[in-house]
């Protein structure tokens, strides 16, 4: 029985790329920090190894409380309102995108 190279490469790619990424973001979830906060913390440790760790103002103390806070909090407000009333866009043209023509009249780009 012959296995196609594409079918055989998928489990390998999943093991090499997806699993470590999933583990990394699970770790961030448990610590209740964002990616940028984690990068800042590691950079801080490389610059000042003996300095105390930077405080995390969003930590709830334990990883269990962090998970509950992230997964069980109410949904935030949406930027899109599916039930909202459609309004005409009454904004003017951005003056920064205006090009002055040969005759001195401004035209949009």
Image: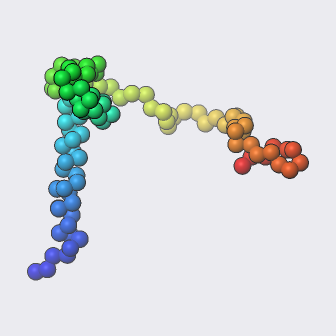
Q: Nearer the viewer, residue 48 or 9?
A: 48
Determine the image quadrant of residue 52.
Answer: top left
**Which quadrant does the N terminus fall into?**
bottom left
Q: Nearer the viewer, residue 52 or 70?
A: 52
Q: Is residue 55 above or below residue 24?
A: above
**In the visual, does 107 lie left or right of 13?**
right
Determine the image quadrant of residue 106.
Answer: top right
Q: Can residue 33 be seen here?
A: no
**In the visual, does 41 lie left or right of 50?**
right
Residue 40 placement (x, y as % from top left): 30, 31
Q: Can residue 61 be seen here?
A: yes
Residue 61 placement (x, y as % from top left): 18, 19
Q: Nearer the viewer, residue 89 or 55?
A: 55
* Residue at the (17%, 69%) spot, across then down: 8
Q: Residue extending furthest right? A: 103
Which colouring convention does the figure follow? rainbow
* Residue at the (19%, 48%) spot, across then down: 20
Q: Nearer the viewer, residue 65 or 54?
A: 54
Determine the image quadrant of residue 71.
Answer: top left
* Residue at the (23%, 29%) spot, across then down: 45
Q: Is residue 98 above or below residue 44?
A: below
* Residue at the (33%, 33%) spot, across then down: 36
Q: Is residue 72 above or below residue 57?
A: below
Q: Residue extending furthest bottom? A: 1
Residue 95 placement (x, y as % from top left): 72, 37
């Amino acid at each position: 029985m012959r296995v196609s190279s594409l079918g055989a490469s998928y489990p390998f790619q999943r093991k090499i790329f997806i699993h470590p990424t999933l583990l990394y973001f699970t770790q961030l979830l448990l610590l209740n920090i964002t990616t940028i906060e984690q990068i800042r913390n590691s950079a801080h440790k490389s610059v000042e190894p003996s300095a105390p760790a930077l405080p995390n103002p969003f930590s709830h103390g334990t990883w269990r409380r962090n998970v509950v806070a992230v997964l069980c909090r109410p949904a935030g407000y949406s930027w899109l309102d599916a039930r909202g009333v459609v309004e005409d866009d009454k904004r003017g043209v951005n003056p920064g995108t205006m090009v002055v023509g040969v005759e001195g009249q401004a035209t949009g780009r």
